[in-house]
Image (cartoon, rainbow, N blue to C red):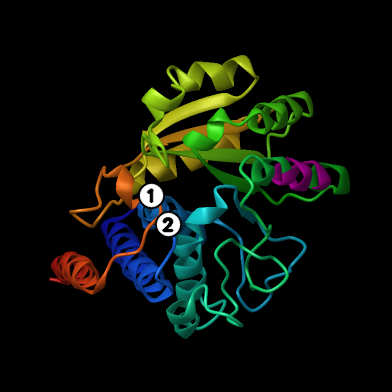
Amino acid sequence: MDKSELLKLKKTACNVRLWTVEGVFNAKSGHPGGSLSAADIMTYLYFSEMNVDPKNPKDPDRDRFVLSKGHCCPALYAVLALKGYFSTDEIKVLRHIGAMLQGHPDMKGTPGVDMSSGSLGQGVSAACGMALAGKLSGKDYRVYAMLGDGECEEGQVWEAAMFAAHNKLDNLTWIVDFNGLQIDGSVADVAGLSELDKKFEAFGFESITIDGHDFEQIEDAVNKAKTVKGKPTVIIANTIKGKGVSYMENQVGWHGKAPNADQYKIAMDELNEQLKALEA
């Protein structure tokens, strides 16, 4: 990745965070913490990696992305809007009655959403089905699914993992947004996911651990996943919940609440300063 591409991705991710905060603030509800931690990875996938076309969102040969942790859709909506699937004006009416963008992704009503999600564990299961369909139909598209670290406490995740390995779904990449926090507190205190890489390897996955805010590490991991044959890959991305907004970072309370007017201004000022620094 050259310096110009890296800078472009950093700017885009900053704008994704700005629109994420904009959406949650205007909705007066939502999940900013996990949206902000996932912003860099989704930015990389949509703006550097995946074969997708906003003008043809149902292209049967497109790559697929499933946000299994569907409550973090504010970041996905920001990415899709900036990619050109719909106007950023839609983000300002997030969760409003009659608006297109709901509190969880809706594949029937939102261009660019490949799977409705929200019930944790179901998204990765659907991604397995997409990957198997690609294999059976001889398609060469790839399927990416993002899940939360807390989501890995769901039994369905591991049922899906067994299915993926059994069917040798090497066109499937899971990405764990490992920010260490979930709605009830730290992941370590709630259930503990020590040696998550080894857990996935025991289930038949290739496992890669990275800094989920480092675009070069994200690129290397995604490229490595494409070389793996005969089994699925999981990328465990260590991230910071609330990344980019000082008072949200590593604070479990920002899992699922919206900023008030004063907090909104602080967040937008900080993110705009970060963007300005990148543009200098």
- The residue lying toward the viewer, choosing from 49 and 205, is 205
Image quarter where the C terminus lies is bottom left
For label 2, the SS is loop
| Residue that appears at 28% across and 51% down | 243
Q: Position of residue 217 (x, y in %)?
A: 36, 40
Please tell me whether residue 54 is drawn above or below residue 5 in the rendered image. below
Is disc 2 in contact with disc 1, using a CB cutoff of under 8 Å? yes
- N-terminal-most mark, 2 or 1: 2
Name the foreground residue: 114 vs 180: 180
Left or right: 3 with respect to 95? left
Magenta stretch containing residue 132, yes or no? Answer: yes
Residue at horizontal 39 percent and vertical 70 percent from the top:
28
According to the picture, the residue beneath numbered tag 2 turns out to be 31
Tag on residue 255?
Answer: 1
Q: State how far apart marks 2 and 1 are (Cα).
A: 5 Å
Seen in the picture, residue 6 relative to 235 is either above or below; the reply is below
Amino acid type, residue under disc 2 in the picture: His
Q: Quadrant of residue 16?
A: bottom left
Indicate left or right for 159 with 91 as reference.
right
Which residue is depicted at the point 35% across and 64% down? 258
Q: Circle 1: is it few (<14), some (14-19), or many (20+) Cα within 10 Å?
A: many
Q: Which residues are magenta?
A: 126-133
Q: Secondary structure at mark 1?
A: loop
Residue 222 visible in the picture: yes
